[in-house]
Amino acid sequence: MKKIFNLSLITLLAGFFAVSCDRNDEDEIQNVESIKIDSVKIAQDTMDVFTIQTIKTYSTYPSACEDFFGYDYIRNGLERNVVAYSYTINGTCTQATRVGVNGFNFRPEEKGIYTFKFWKGKDSSNQNIWIEKTIVVE
C-alpha cells in the first residue's frame, strides 16, 4: 500500500512539474505602451452627485497581437487626464487593424464642472493632443 501511495505521489508531482514548465512564449506580454484614444462617448453630460455612468473610449489596434491593458486616470481637482494603454504579445498575429471599445465608471462625489482630457497622441511638434469633454455634476 505504501509503494502505491509513493508511486501515486511521484506521478502526481511529475505531472505538476510537466504542466507548470510547459510555457507558450507566444502568449507572453512583450510590452505595454500608451495607445491613442480616437473618440469618446459620454452618455450624459449632466448627472447627479454619487450616480454612476460608464465613459467609453475607442482606440485602433494595428494587429491582433495588441489589446487593451488599462487606463492611467490622473485626478487634479475637477480635471481628469485619461491615457489608455495597450499590451503586445509575441506571437503570430494577423495585421488587420481593429477598433477596441473600453470604458470606466465615473462616480462624482462633489458638485461642479468636471473636465476630462483623453490622450489622442502627439502632433507634428511632439506636443500632446487631448480630446476634451465636460460633465456637469449637480
Image (spheres, grey):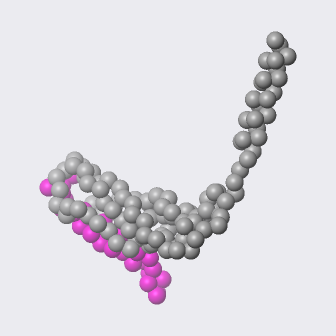
Q: Quadrant of residue 137?
A: bottom left
Residue 112 highlighted magenta (yes or no): yes
Q: Who's the residue at 39% across and 63% down the image?
A: 101
Q: Main secondary structure of the magenta part?
A: strand
Residue 15 highlighted magenta (yes or no): no
Q: Who's the residue at 70% across and 57% down the image?
A: 25
| Location of residue 100 with respect to 128 vertically, above or below | above
| Location of residue 15 with respect to 7 vertically, above or below | below
Q: Residue furthest bottom?
A: 124
| 124 left or right, relative to 93 | left
Q: Quadrant of residue 58?
A: bottom left
Q: Who's the residue at 17% across and 56% down the image?
A: 47
| 121 left or right, relative to 105 | right
Q: Who's the residue at 69% across and 54% down the image?
A: 24
- Image quadrant for the C terminus? bottom left
Q: Which residues are magenta?
A: 110-138
- x then y, percent, for residue 37: 40, 71
- Whether residue 30 is visible: yes
